[in-house]
């Protein structure tokens, strides 16, 4: 079973089966590859496409990001999740603007130092945009390699990672590296899928060990599922009679970092004590709304919203600087977390 077989079979398959018309492939540049690769971390292609198209309309190059406000960039990320990615794009654009005259660097050592870019993303940028021989090891590639070579063990373990990186390096060719890189990602996304892989149309099926041993369902080895903990939070949807809503800008670290959300009740705080501390305006009506569940990778969040109608919003100087009044409906100028956006649309 030579590594050449693996590489050549994938390259042959790519000619008729690879994806060549994704939005970031049409006018490919280091910039388009960078943005798409960051968006594709943890997110599927079909979800990314509309976000990518909107983002590129507003931010066609590095300078346009470097000159914008983080709030605006995050508004284009609203709903995509994993907001640290958006914040890292912003930090990187600032560095590129200052240090590289807004030209994306060409070497691994420079690219790997940029915020939010790890070994696999750096490899993807170098292979896809600069056609340099660098390997990638994203989730799709790990799955293909773990099955083809029958690698058992949790993918997060460092010895398994090392094995997979060695296999990725072994198979990455010097020529057509861009096509090969796209091919292995496409095979993982469309044929060697997590459940029910389509081995009957797979170009690698002849020598695939998982297929030979009928272990496609067992590989890659899954971590036993641990039950997610549930966290609860009370939020207040405070609206005045001129249809303005009070929003809180969240700190840059932590969940929904840098996005706008509804004011939250702290530990042991009641709605009345919060209103006394922060608003001191007559309340017309308080309505408890149905709880909303939102899933994060490691826990579920139960949001308990209460709608509070007040007559007039207090003057700006009377509210804390992290709170802002926004006129409804809210357009795209600020970043909102997905469940907050849903609740606002229902107002
Ligand atoms: S034969 Fe099946 S398990 Fe093996 S690489 Fe192809 S799709 Fe994946």
Image (tube, helix red, strand yellow):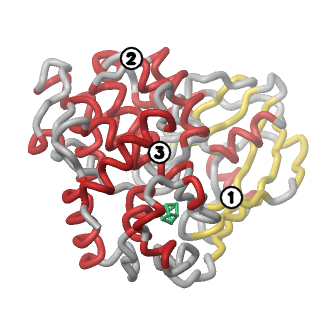
For the residues carrying marks 3 and 2, which lies nearer the camera in this image?
3
Ligand 1 within 8 Å of the CB at mark 3: no
Q: Secondary structure at mark 2?
A: loop
Query: The C terminus appears in which quarter of the rendering?
Result: top right
Q: Are marks 1 and 2 in contact (CB under 8 Å)?
A: no
The x and y percentages for residue 24 are 43, 26
- Compared with 91, 290 (above or below) is below
The part of the image, by quadrant, that contains residue 245 is top right
Q: Residues within 10 Å of mark 3 (few under 14, many from 20)?
A: many
- Is residue 210 toward the left or the right of residue 283 in the image? left
The x and y percentages for residue 101 are 14, 18
Of 88 and 315, the residue lying toward us: 88
Mark closer to the chain start, 1 or 2: 2
Q: Are marks 1 and 3 in contact (CB under 8 Å)?
A: no
For the residues carrying marks 1 and 2, which lies nearer the camera in this image?
2
Q: Residue at x 78, y 35 (%)?
A: 239
- Is residue 104 toward the left or the right of residue 83 in the image? left
Query: The N terminus appears in which quarter of the rendering?
Result: bottom left
Of 37 and 243, the residue lying toward us: 37
Q: Which residue is mark 1?
A: 294
Q: Residue at x 40, y 30 (%)?
A: 70
The x and y percentages for residue 175 are 19, 37
Q: Which residue is mark 3?
A: 186
Residue 326 visible in the snapshot = yes
Q: Which residue is mark 2?
A: 27
Q: Are marks 3 and 2 in contact (CB under 8 Å)?
A: no
Distance (Cα) linking label 1 and label 2: 36 Å
Mark closer to the chain start, 1 or 3: 3
């Amino acid at each position: 079973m030579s590594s050449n077989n693996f590489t050549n079979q994938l390259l042959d398959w790519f000619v008729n089966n690879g994806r060549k018309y994704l939005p970031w492939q049409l006018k490919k540049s280091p910039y388009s590859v960078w943005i798409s690769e960051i968006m594709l971390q943890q997110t599927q292609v079909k979800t990314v496409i509309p976000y990518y198209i909107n983002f590129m309309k507003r931010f066609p190059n590095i300078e346009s990001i470097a000159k914008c406000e983080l709030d605006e960039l995050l508004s284009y990320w609203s709903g995509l999740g994993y907001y640290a990615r958006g914040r890292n794009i912003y930090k990187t654009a600032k560095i590129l603007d200052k240090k590289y005259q807004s030209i994306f660097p060409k070497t691994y050592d420079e690219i790997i130092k940029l915020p939010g870019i790890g070994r696999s993303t750096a490899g993807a940028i170098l292979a896809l945009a600069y056609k340099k021989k660098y390997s990638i090891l994203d989730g799709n590639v790990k799955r293909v390699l773990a099955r083809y070579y029958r690698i058992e063990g949790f993918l997060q373990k460092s010895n398994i990672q090392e094995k997979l990186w060695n296999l990725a390096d072994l198979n990455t060719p010097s020529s057509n590296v861009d096509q090969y890189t796209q091919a292995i990602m496409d095979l993982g996304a469309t044929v060697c899928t997590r459940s029910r892989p389509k081995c009957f149309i797979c170009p690698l099926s002849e020598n695939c060990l998982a297929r030979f041993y009928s272990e496609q369902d067992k590989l890659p080895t899954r971590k036993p599922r641990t039950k997610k903990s549930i966290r609860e939070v009370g939020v207040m949807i405070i609206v005045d009679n001129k249809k303005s809503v009070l929003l809180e800008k969240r700190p840059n670290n932590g969940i929904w970092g840098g996005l706008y959300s509804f004011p939250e009740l702290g530990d042991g705080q009641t709605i009345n004590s919060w209103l006394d501390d922060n608003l001191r305006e007559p309340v017309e009506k308080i309505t408890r709304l149905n709880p909303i569940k939102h899933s994060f990778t490691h826990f579920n969040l139960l949001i308990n919203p209460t709608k509070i109608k007040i007559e007039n919003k207090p003057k700006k100087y009377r509210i804390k600087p992290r709170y802002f009044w926004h006129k409804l409906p809210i357009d795209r100028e600020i970043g909102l977390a997905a469940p907050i956006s849903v609740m606002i649309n229902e107002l």
